[in-house]
Amino acid sequence: MIRNFDQTDRRMLKFPAVHPCEAISPETLLNSLINLSQNICNYQSKLFSTQRKNARQTIRQIGLLLLFFEETRDLRLALTDSVVLCFSELHHAFQKVQFLLEDCTREGAKLWILIKCQVVSTQFRALIRAIATALDVLPLGLIDVGVEVKELVELAGKQARNAKVEVDPEDERALQQVFSVLDHFEKGIEPDSSFMKRVLDHLEIRNWNDCNKEIKFLEEQLDFQYSDCDERDAPFLSSLLGLMNYCRGVIFETWNHRSNKSDARHSIEALTCINAEDFRCPISLELMTDPVTVSTGQTYDRSSIQRWLKAGNMTCPKTGERMTSPELVPNTTLRKLIQQFCTDVGVCASSSGSQSRDIARTISPGSPAAAEEMKFLSRFLARRLVFGSSEQKTKAAYEIRFLAKSNIFNRSCLIEAGTILPLINLLSSSFEHHAQEIAISALLKLSKHTSGKKEIVESGGLKPILAVLQRGLSLEAKQMAAAIIFYLASVKAYRKLIGETPEVVPTLVELIKDGTTCGKKNGVVAIFGLLLHSGNHQRVISSGTIPLLMDIFSSSDNDELIADSLAVLAAIAESVDGTLAILQTSALSTIPRILRSSASRAAREYSVTVLLSLCKNGGAEAISILAKDHSLMSSLYLLLTDGSSYGSSKARALIKLLHKFHEASSSGRIASVVPRERPVHVW
């Protein structure tokens, strides 16, 4: 069998080629060789920023052999065992050639291939020699093709034997310039940008988007290093990543306004509407750190499914189907989503998982050069925010948004460089909604840092952020302002300050009422943050929050939004006044329904928390209504077995309360069950 490999399943400069099986038919092998050769020849039209000579001569030699393979197929010649063996060796070498050409032309990998130029040249040399060896032992006389075709094969063999495979002198010069620039940065010296411009020109990295692709690729390679626990290249990758960040921010003045605008909006939508339940391993029920897909199409955390397979199980744990293969395919797309979710909402995948290491490692720079690159870039962006044109200010804010998105050290550098005050000023001076969106988004990323929260408040940022929340030029800007309120409210001293500002809670309630799913979610979590200060409870209740939350339960199918809304309701229900307001709604019928039907464990646990508070603060009348719901007990017992320790304890307390009520009602001693003396009227 001849395997096909997807590039997303393969690491850079790794070549998982396989020899065709011994039982393969000559016809199948020949057709596969032709397909491989055609794929390789198609690289003739692709851009090679480095390794141009080595790639071209390899493609040219395989192009000559393609004519030979095609004539052999067209003549339907019988192939001897010795010919098949030689073709098998060529097939194995051609697979590796194709992988190597994929890497040399991979989007975003230009700088990394330059850095690895010696390794890549060595690989080209080895593959060309492997082709030459196979052609040397090929019994060409036993294959009845035309004389001209045989001459082409002999020419290909001669070229392969005599090929000079070495690093291009231009590549070598560009590589030395990169090392020189990194050395300057490591010594705390900002190098002349003309040095790096020459390297970028050599690699044909010509604009902001080209540079950004290089950054994304380097970030991916750095993540692989940490997930594999093989961090040998991590410091150097960090230096290169910092260098390309510097180039993107300093060297490339122009940027694709429209494409970045679309990217910003899509990013906001993805980050605020992700459902964490989709990221849990069906076996461990924890957030997956290394998701892999099995032959049935189901995805599990690698460590969990490996333990399952090691125990001798060959059925899919989720579907019960028999797995046709033990092969585990990395789900890189899901892995990136989980990493982004964890980074932006501050969730650690597990106490021992790789993602928690990924988040923690960004507290400090990956290398001395990376630290200096970030400091120089931060100061440059801070100056641009103050002295630049309107377009330059917007671009500087966009760079800050990118840099602060998932890197704690970057955030600290940007805050220390003084970017927050000019970003706040940009909020009120922006008359174009896209510029305001970018500025508020940059502030949102910086507000996740402890010193960022302090700097925003002490720089007078609360009032402009509230102005965006009320009168923002776009819905996206308003919902990001609400998210900043949530992060600021995580500081105890600021909850009271924000809550006492009269417009805050009513404006958040309006966002919950009229916003998109993402806007509703940001409004809900911001109110939750404010409820951590008891003085804000009455403001939240009197602003009409509770009826809106009840509307969400009946109109939304977003599990995360429902869970967050229940968390707010649970916080409100802790007080007697909150319970009274909740019981004026249909909560006692609606929340048990969520408990029975929700797929979200968080939603079920918050449901029980709300019901327990309603029983404790609502008196016998509230308890009696729940006691009549015969399906409630089964849902509570289920939570005892599959809930967290928090959820299980709440479920146990409610079960105990309901049991005591049933016992007391049968003996006429209901009053003794009520935990508090003040009952409230149940609607």
Image: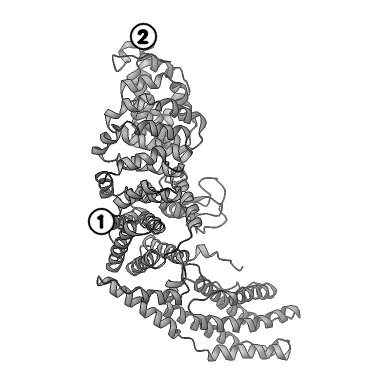
Per the image, label 1 sits on a secondary structure element best described as helix
From the viewer's perspective, tell me whether residue 305 is left or right of residue 95.
Answer: left
Residue type of the residue flagged with mark 1: Glu
Q: Quadrant of the C terminus?
A: top left
Residue 522 pos. (x, y %):
41, 39
Q: Quadrant of residue 482?
A: top left
Toward the viewer: 637 or 216?
Answer: 216
Q: Quadrant of residue 654?
A: top left
Check disc 1 and report the residue beneath it.
Answer: 416
In the depicted structure, whether residue 257 falls above or below residue 610:
below
Per the image, label 2 sits on a secondary structure element best described as helix
Toward the viewer: 190 or 351?
Answer: 190
Assess disc 2: are there few (<14), some (14-19) or many (≥20) residues with their C-alpha within 10 Å of its C-alpha: few
Residue 337 pos. (x, y %):
45, 52
Assess disc 1: are there few (<14), some (14-19) or many (≥20) residues with their C-alpha within 10 Å of its C-alpha: some
Check disc 2 and report the residue beneath it.
Answer: 667
Q: Can you see residue 677?
A: yes
Residue 269 pos. (x, y %):
47, 46
C-alpha span from label 1 to label 2: 69 Å
- Residue that appears at 48% across and 28% down: 551
In the depicted structure, whether residue 284 falls above or below residue 74:
above
Give the label, 1 or 2, closer to the camera.
Answer: 1
In the depicted structure, whether residue 356 falls above or below residue 255:
above
Toward the viewer: 423 or 220?
Answer: 423
From the viewer's perspective, tell me whether residue 344 is left or right of residue 77.
Answer: left
Residue type of the residue flagged with mark 2: Ser
- Residue that appears at 45% across and 24% down: 632
Q: Can you see residue 651?
A: no
Q: Quadrant of residue 236?
A: bottom left
From the viewer's perspective, tell me whether residue 429 is left or right of residue 333.
Answer: left
